[in-house]
Image: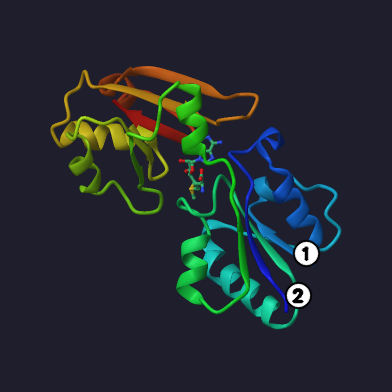
Amino acid sequence: MSKLYLVGTGPGSSDYLTKAAIDAVESVDVLVGSQRALDLFPGFVGDTLVLRARNMDEMMKKSISLVDEGKDVAILSTGDPGFSGVLKPILNLRDDLDIEVIPGISSLQLAAARLQLPWDQANLLTLHGKGNSQVILDYLDNGKPTIVLPDFRVEKLAQFLLENGIHLERKVAVCERLSYPDERLFKGTLKEIAGKEFSYLCVMVIY
Ligand SMILES: C[S@@+](CC[C@H](N)C(=O)[O-])C[C@H]1O[C@@H](n2cnc3c(N)ncnc32)[C@H](O)[C@@H]1O
């Protein structure tokens, strides 16, 4: 029976790719993923499909139909497939496939490591693709640090928090482009972050 692998590829650099991920990719006929995830496997010889924000649903359905046709398929999910990754959308479409999830090192985990923050007591949250919703406000007063994947722009999230009454001197950190050569860590206050510019790939921690 053909199989669908959901493969976590880590935050970006091949240093954080597991052997299990490499072995799964080497075993399949078709590889599906964002361009930055596909670039981790330059030697892959089968067919590849490029995943973009706009064709996500179409590519999930296409991957499932390829499995139905008898192909082994791996969908690459940066970080871990189970956190703001491809696991949920696939299970929403079909729950009767032969699926194997290969965990990856999440950007949240690498952010916690860089900041030397034990994350067993942290609030973990994603706003990715959901907008700056009120949901985050419920977490910010429970005495625990909150590690959040912003909805695209970290400075917009900081502005939203300020507009919603979070103190401007609240301590925060931003981990940008984790594991890449141009990785940057910023530690400061909410007010400072609201006035800066960051790239799309950021994890934010609100202490
Ligand atoms: C669709 S979510 C995928 C999260 C992924 N499944 C994980 O476990 O890290 C994409 C978001 O993850 C975060 N992210 C992914 N890779 C990152 C990196 N190398 N550095 C910082 N943030 C990253 C960013 O917030 C980005 O907008």
The answer to which of 167 and 76 lies nearer the viewer is: 76
Mark 2 closeness class: few <14, some 14–19, many ≥20 residues within 10 Å: some
Q: What residue is rendered at 23% in x and 22% in y?
A: 170
Q: Is residue 63 above or below residue 164?
A: below
**Left or right: where does residue 100 sit relative to residue 154?**
right
Quadrant assignment for the C terminus: top left
Q: The residue tagged with tag 1: helix, strand or loop?
A: loop
User: Image quadrant for the N terminus?
Assistant: bottom right
| Rendering coords of residue 78 (x, y %) | 58, 47
Label 1 with label 2: CB-CB less than 8 Å: yes
Q: What secondary structure is found at the residue carrying circle 2?
A: loop
Task: Determine which residue is flagged by label 1.
Answer: 28
- Amino acid type at circle 2 is Lys
First in residue order: circle 1 vs circle 2: 1
Locate residue 19 relative to residue 128 in the image: left or right: right
Residue occupied by mark 2: 71
The Cα atoms of the two marked residues, 1 and 2, are separated by 8 Å
